[in-house]
Image (cartoon, rainbow, N blue to C red):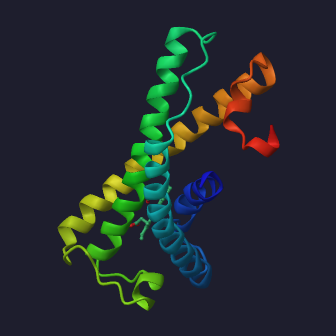
Amino acid sequence: MALIVIGMIPAGFVMIQEGLPRAVQNSMFITHKNLGTLMLLLIIVRLLYRWRNPPPPEPEHLPHWQQKVAGLTHWALYALLVVMPVSGYVRVRAGGFPIEVLDAMGVPALVPRSDALAEVAKSVHFYAGWAIAALVAMHIGAALYHGVIKRDGVLERMLPRKAR
Ligand code: HEM
């Protein structure tokens, strides 16, 4: 999920630039919409997993303010991982556009066709896009700070078991 999100954010900003060759822009939009829809399913699975398997408490040697900021960042990241695909979905469906994978499976649009709704969802997607970009940068910065400078075991907690 991390790799997909880290790819989706710059791709999202690049694909809306004017002057891109039409074919490149089209394939970027198609990839973005369909991978983004997959993200919506993955975040639901992830939230269910987190609910059944809560993470260990923040390491005790961390100053209290760092524990608080880390907790808030994690909650905000989860919230934005829901807001981004939902707002993208609503923007596209309310705008009357296709989501190729869902269309091929015959899944109907779950929101009505409405330009006003599409515009609201577009703004939400745009501002939430900047917010998630900032939080991902903070999250990576903090992980590197702990892993490379402090070397206090916080980065290791984040890595898959094999990589530890
Ligand atoms: C984790 C999931 C997603 C991330 C991180 C993400 C990220 C972004 C970012 C950073 C942008 C550029 C800022 C903007 O103009 O809004 C963007 C644009 C866009 N995204 Fe997403 N997106 C996600 C999911 C989706 C989904 C599920 C759809 C549709 C099914 C979608 C459709 C679009 C569209 C159509 C644009 C162009 C904005 C416009 O002009 O309407 N995105 N996305």
Residue 108 shows in the view: yes
Task: Count up the numbered dots.
Answer: 0
Residue 121 drawn above or below residue 70: below
Point 41% across, 55% down: residue: 84
**Side of 93 where 116 appears, left or right:** left
- Residue 153 occupies which quadrant of the picture? top right
Name the residue furthest front: 52
- Residue 60 occupies which quadrant of the picture? top right
Residue 77 drawn above or below residue 14: above
Residue 76 drawn above or below residue 106: above
Ligand 1, image quadrant it occupies: bottom left
State the image coordinates of residue 22 (x, y, percent, origin top left). 56, 83
Point 76% across, 16% down: residue: 150
Q: Nearer the viewer, residue 136 or 158?
A: 158
Point 47% across, 57% down: residue: 45
**Side of 84 where 146 appears, left or right:** right
State the image coordinates of residue 41 (x, y, percent, origin top left). 45, 64
Q: Quadrant of the N terminus?
A: bottom right
Q: Nearer the viewer, residue 75 or 55?
A: 55
Point 56% across, 74% down: residue: 31
- Residue 21 occupies which quadrant of the picture? bottom right
Residue 131 shows in the view: no
Q: Quadrant of the C terminus?
A: top right
State the image coordinates of residue 149 (x, y, percent, origin top left). 79, 19
State the image coordinates of residue 135 (x, y, percent, origin top left). 52, 37
